[in-house]
Amino acid sequence: MPIATVNPATGETLRTYDALDAGEIERRLARARAAFDAHRTTSFAERARLLHRAADLLDEGLRDIAEVMTTEMGKPVTQARAEAAKCVKAMRWYADHAEELLADEESSGEAAKDSGASRVLVRYRPLGPVLAVMPWNFPLWQVIRFAAPALMAGNVGLLKHASNVPRTALFLEELFRGAGYPEGCFQTLLIGSGAVEDVLRDPRVAAATLTGSEPAGRSVASVAGDEIKKTVLELGGSDPFVVMPSADIDRAAATAVTARVQNNGQSCIAAKRFIVHTDVFDAFTERFTAGMRALKVGDPMDEETEVGPLASEQGRRDLEELVDDAVENGATVLCGGERPDGPGWYYPPTVLADVTPGMRIHHEEAFGPVATLYRAAGLDEAVAIANDSPFGLSSNVWTREEADVDRFVRDLEAGGVYVNGMTASHPAFPFGGVKRSGYGRELSGHGIREFCNITTVWHGA
Ligand code: NAP
């Protein structure tokens, strides 16, 4: 894929970029290693000062970078601003909390004595330069949620961003440099995916994090496995949204619409499969379908737009194929389902009912504003449908019954259970999945420690 900014609302190529050559990649890897040797010894106070400065700069330039994101990948500009604001908040949060999250863990009690020590402590030391392979869908947030904790832990970052968001990728490097981070602490590598393997195998790169599709995750994880390097993988999702009879149906249906179409439907944690108890199926379906139909689709730069174009022509083709396959195999289209004429990679909000396991969409991720509806006779069946997916990122459940909640929390195969709400990430809480959605966690104490050398320091008696 060429490294280029192509406006999804028009299909126009605005700018192409040359990939870095081998010499420039080498210089950047050397810089990263040198920067790590200095950055790892800095105090939390110094790291926090730099990250606060970067957050302030992002805050000041928020409207401009939001327009860049919208131009590169088509999300409504209002949502792009919200994404940038969320990044500012997360940067400040890590600047203020990293020291506490990474504080030494002292042990002088029974276990220490039992090991023959007077004192044992666990210290979280940084690992080194971390390669971050990132997707285009939240082009700022995905990077910041890696970079803010990593830099606070004393690591340095090498960003290989998706090839369709080069301006956002370059902006990020400039942001950290502009905030005063020493050269090499955070660098963008404009490279294609074919160049990732050599970078990852380089001995100066300590670990890798990848957010993206399953094939990309498999490829990076196998190379890292071969090199015995730590990885965190945040991959695809097809999150269930379960509605039980005791739920507030109006709120559930309104939230379901947002949960499905946020970011033009291209979110890993979007609710994608709507599993509704038969007692409330008709009431929910009517409200949900009406809400999907009423969405304002159009130019993502327009302040009123709720759903913009998909990010790429290929992305729209993939989505259409999933819908066509479902319809050919008996699914009922309740709304949408036909691409509009005209420029740009638009696809309408779509609801499919009568979905069965024989359809591709039952097992694959629909990366666009397409919802599938399932009817469940009771809680057992709802759980069974929810778990009948290769993915296990997050889940949403709507009920007022404590017993239902207990069952969902016990039985749903997912990295999150959001009760009477929609999945959203927050700097203080862990984020990640199970099954084909990946492994490891981002955010919170769990996330920041993923790229730490957890060091046992033992003192003899
Ligand atoms: P993608 O095609 O996998 O690309 C993601 C990144 O991986 C890009 O930088 C891409 O570079 C790179 N890449 C692709 N193939 C690679 C390979 N074989 N070796 C090394 N790097 C490779 O995914 P996408 O289309 O950008 O993003 C959509 C996917 O990301 C969806 O499945 C979505 O669910 C998932 N996602 C997951 C999360 C999460 O937190 N779990 C969050 C957001 C998105 P190029 O652009 O140069 O190909």
Image (tube, grey):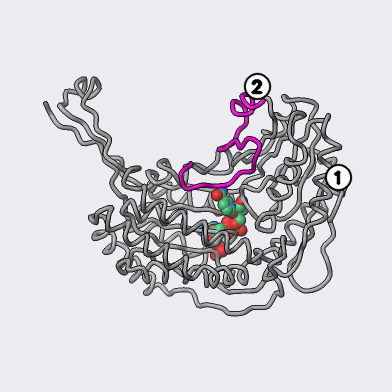
Q: Residue lying at the far left in this picture: please name it.
A: 461
Dot 1: within a 10 Å radius of its alpha carbon, few (fewer than 14), some, or many (20 or more) residues? many
Image quarter where ligand 1 lies: bottom right
Q: Residue 434 has which mark?
A: none
The residue labelled by disc 2 is 403
Regarding residue 215, the answer to whether it shows in the image is no
Q: Given the image, on which type of amino acid does mark 1 rest? A: Ala
Q: Given the image, on which type of amino acid does mark 2 rest? A: Ala
Which element carries disc 2, helix, strand or loop? Answer: helix
Q: In which quadrant of the rendered image does the C terminus lie?
A: top left
Q: Quadrant of residue 282?
A: top right
Image location of residue 178, percent across then percent down: 37, 71
Image location of residue 378, percent across then percent down: 77, 25
Cα separation, mark 1 vs mark 2, equals: 33 Å
Q: Is residue 4 above or below residue 51?
A: below
Can residue 403 be found in the magenta stretch? yes
- The answer to whether the residues at label 1 and label 2 have Cβ atoms under 8 Å apart is no
The residue labelled by disc 1 is 331
Can residue 30 be found in the magenta stretch? no
Q: Nearer the viewer, mark 1 or mark 2?
A: 2
Q: Quadrant of residue 35?
A: bottom left
Magenta segment: 402-429
Image location of residue 249, percent across then percent down: 77, 37
Regarding residue 246, the answer to whether it shows in the image is yes
Q: Is residue 114 above or below residue 14?
A: above
Which element carries disc 1, helix, strand or loop? Answer: loop
Q: Identify the residue at horizontal 58%, vertical 79% (top origin).
A: 15
